[in-house]
Image (cartoon, rainbow, N blue to C red):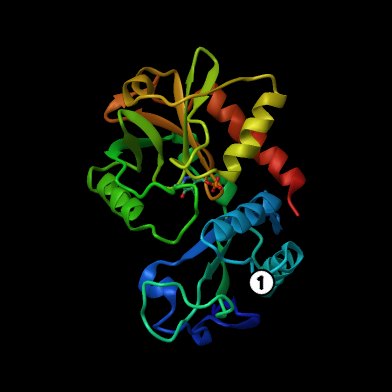
Amino acid sequence: MTRTVYLNGDYVPETEAKVSIFDRGFVMGDGVYEVTSVLDGRLLDFPGHVTRLTRSLAELGMDNPLSDEEWLAAHRKLLELNDVTEGMVYLQVTRGNPGDRDFAYPPQGTPQTVVIFTQSKPGLADNPQAKTGIRVISIPDLRWHRRDIKTVQLLYPSMAKMEAKRQGVDDAWFTEDGLVTEGTSNNTYIVKGGRIITRPLSNDILHGITRASLLRYAAEAQMQIEERPFTIAEAQEADEAFSTSASAFVMPVVEVDGATLGDGRPGPVATRLREIYLEESRKTAI
Ligand code: PMP
């Protein structure tokens, strides 16, 4: 099926959606994005995603081209046009086409490029990996130091993902100064003695929208949370581990750098948190 996508205010077939070769997103990686999951035809954690989008744009000196209401309306329209009930919506905003390649930003007022598209993923909430858990390896975090900005510069995470695949596992956790920062495309957690341990927010990690919601739900469920960095050795000795992201929700991790955690199956805390997250985020979906 040819999808309908959004490009600069128009709803067009994907085959007709064209962006300039001079676009700064293409030549400079000068753009930001968001991914929002869809269950039951509704958007999960949407206010969090548009709020982070505005922040990412502001950190790069860009305006938000649409209001929150306009973003929501465009997301909903694409879901309807493409008949998506389970999957995700991707949006991207770049600094647009300055007409020539130049390191300096084009003048303020140069039209930005705004793209939104959907990906249908039936069975998203019933991902079989959530039942078995995933295996991860650690990889040095060689990304830039503004990981709090959700830019389209995803080459290093892609390289890490390929290295994980090459080693026959599912994902990679980045480490820096002996401590885990985050996963290739997720925030990371360990569980020890019932406490949920996760790295605090800073420029070192993306401020996950799923992380924010999950920590709120966990606190409401009287679970103990400790926001501090942890090492790979600690993860290997933890009772459980898991990661969170908009597209995978809560994903149990059962192996870290070859060490099996617990009995090698998803633990009760990660399993419960996945249930709570899915239940609560479905309730607040719009
Ligand atoms: N960290 C990184 C590096 C990511 O790419 C992502 C997913 N985009 C996350 C964390 C999780 O963020 P969210 O829960 O908002 O999807």
Is residue 36 or residue 95 the one in the foreground? 95
Is residue 100 or residue 230 the one in the foreground? 100
For the C terminus, the image quarter is: bottom right
For the N terminus, the image quarter is: bottom right
Q: x, y (%) of residue 86?
A: 62, 57
| Mark 1 C-beta to ligand 1 under 8 Å | no
Q: Residue at coordinates 39% horizontally, 74% vertically from top-left?
A: 26
Q: Is residue 261 left or right of residue 78?
A: left
| Residue 215 in sight | yes
Q: Residue at coordinates 48% horizontally, 30% vertically from top-left?
A: 199
Mark 1 closeness class: few <14, some 14–19, many ≥20 residues within 10 Å: many
In the image, residue 172 above or below residue 189: below
**Residue behind mark 1:** 78
Q: x, y (%) of residue 179?
A: 35, 29
In the image, residue 283 above or below residue 33: above
Q: Residue at coordinates 54% horizontally, 17% vertically from top-left?
A: 195
Q: Quadrant of residue 63?
A: bottom right
Three-letter code for the amino acid on which mark 1 is drawn: Leu
Q: Residue at coordinates 57% horizontally, 74% vertically from top-left?
A: 114
